[in-house]
Amino acid sequence: MSASQHSPIAAEFVDPLAPVLIQGMTGRTGRTHSQHMRRYGTNVVAGVSPESDVAGVAGIPIFRNCAQAVGETGASVSVAMVPPLAVLQAIEEAVGAGIRLVVTVAEGVPVHDAVRALDLVRHAGARWIGASTPGLAIPGRLKLGFLPDVALAPGPIGVMAKSGTLSYEICHRLAGWGLGQSLWVGVGGDPVKGTRFADVLPYMAVDPQTHAILVIGEIGGSEEEELADAIVTLGCHKPVYALIAGRSAREGVTMGHAGALIQRGIGTIDSKTRALTAAGARVFTRIQHLVEAIAGDFNTATGDRACG
């Protein structure tokens, strides 16, 4: 799929032409990644920094608050590059100003803040990607966050991932086989989050540019089991490939992500594997086996694909 053949369904999830504001833009992270996003093609139109006297960054105007930024630029998407304890306030301000999609990248957002944020965005009818996420992308069109360009390529695979690092590695390898992404959503590994696997599936299941779905999960919680239920309920017949990380994790010990916690047998790799397999997905525990299976099914040597 070329960059011009963007997915109409992915555009329903996030408009690739949407005007974007960056909260915390005058900080080091905000300055750096706002320019990376803009160079990628993202329509970054404003920054927000309540305590800064900077008028602009790289030609992008800076406003004191989201309401001013939205009023002047019509921004409908926010990427909040603020510290974890400032995430709830950033979401409140963004949604209060009419922002429809908020992406938050900070690790370590308190769970009670995430609970309040989730309630807030649901009542507002907005979408939240986070608490912690590397972002999302429609490759060749839009990048929100800091997904690495080297792993992004337009293509037929819809990607939803808890782990940023694993998704970078897998997507980079698949891109080397000529298999890019139609939509890439980093849902993050927090126990309380704005968007879960089952929320992304309805878009990928009907998207004509998405020919297969790649799920990068991990032990802990019930998100993969929820996805398995959704696959069956929706009657999704597209090939689903899943990598479940964390086989060596001990019960009661958090492994990496706050949500990667097994307690009393809940959230085990076996329970997730059983649920996804029963729903028709192919489940892997090694990256190489996963990549080889996808590449083989798409028959990349001849350019044909074995999925509909």
Image (spheres, helix red, strand yellow):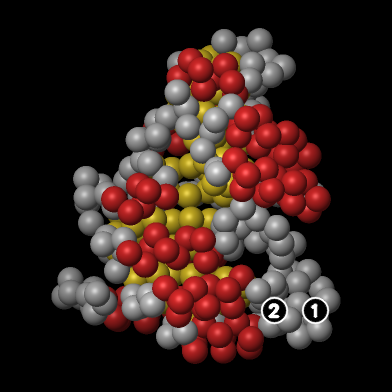
Residue 26, picture quadrant: top right
Query: In the rendered image, which residue does mark 1 sit on?
Result: 263
Mark yes or no: residue 172 visible. Answer: no
Q: Note whether 288 is above or below 82 in the view shown.
A: below
Image position of 294 (left or right of 302) = right
- The residues tagged by marks 2 and 1 sit, at their Cα atoms, a distance apart of 7 Å
Q: Which residue is drawn at 60% across and 82% down?
A: 272
Q: Note whether 103 is above or below 289 in the view shown.
A: above
Q: Are marks 2 and 1 in contact (CB under 8 Å)?
A: yes
Q: Note whether 270 is above or below 142 in the view shown.
A: below
Residue 48 locus on image (x, y percent): 60, 23
Q: Dot 1 lies on which element?
A: loop
Q: Note whether 240 is above or below 42 in the view shown.
A: below
Q: Dot 2 lies on which element?
A: loop
Asked whether 47 or 18 is in front, the reply is 18
The N terminus lies in quadrant: bottom left
